[in-house]
Image: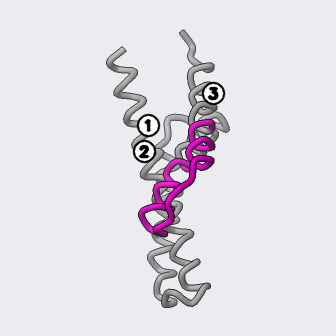
Amino acid sequence: MRLDVLVVSRTLGLFAVTAIAELLGCYLPLLWLTGKGRPWLLAPAALSLAIFVWLLTLHPAASGRVYAAYGAVYIATALVWLYVVDGVTPRWNDYVGVGLALLGAGVIALGHRSD
């Protein structure tokens, strides 16, 4: 059981770091396109997206099931980003949506256990 908790924790941590790299890689060009940032932001954006792609290769299995679970963590991370970076407080429906996404990811992950 302890090993399972460690594996899940590492996987969730990897998912969160992957999501941050993806968000940053998309956010920096948005700043430039909306006139809120300089063109040089495209260089770190490209680096961030390259890191994002590399991080995807570190996931336990390259399958739709893993990426579906990652999607839920991405949604949760995007809401944290909304609050921390954009300064927008999420509403109750945002929390419900994240909860449903994470619950769905849990069903996917736990339903596939090969015990």
In the figure, is residue 10 to the left or right of 67? left
Neighbourhood count class around disc 3 (C-alpha, 10 Å): few under 14, some 14–19, many 20 upward:
some
Q: Amino acid at mark 2?
A: Leu
Which of the two marks, 3 or 1, is nearer to us in this view? 3
The vertical placement of 13 against 3, above or below, is below
Q: Count the marks: how many? A: 3
| Image x and y of residue 51, in percent | 46, 61
Which of the two marks, 3 or 2, is nearer to us in this view? 3
Residue located beneath label 1 in the image: 11
Residue at image x 46%, y 55%?
80
Residue located beneath label 2 in the image: 14
Residue 89 in the magenta stretch? The answer is: yes
Residue 108 - label: 3
Rendering quarter of residue 68:
top right
The vertical placement of 87 against 12, above or below, is below
Rendering quarter of residue 111:
top right
Q: Amino acid at mark 1?
A: Thr
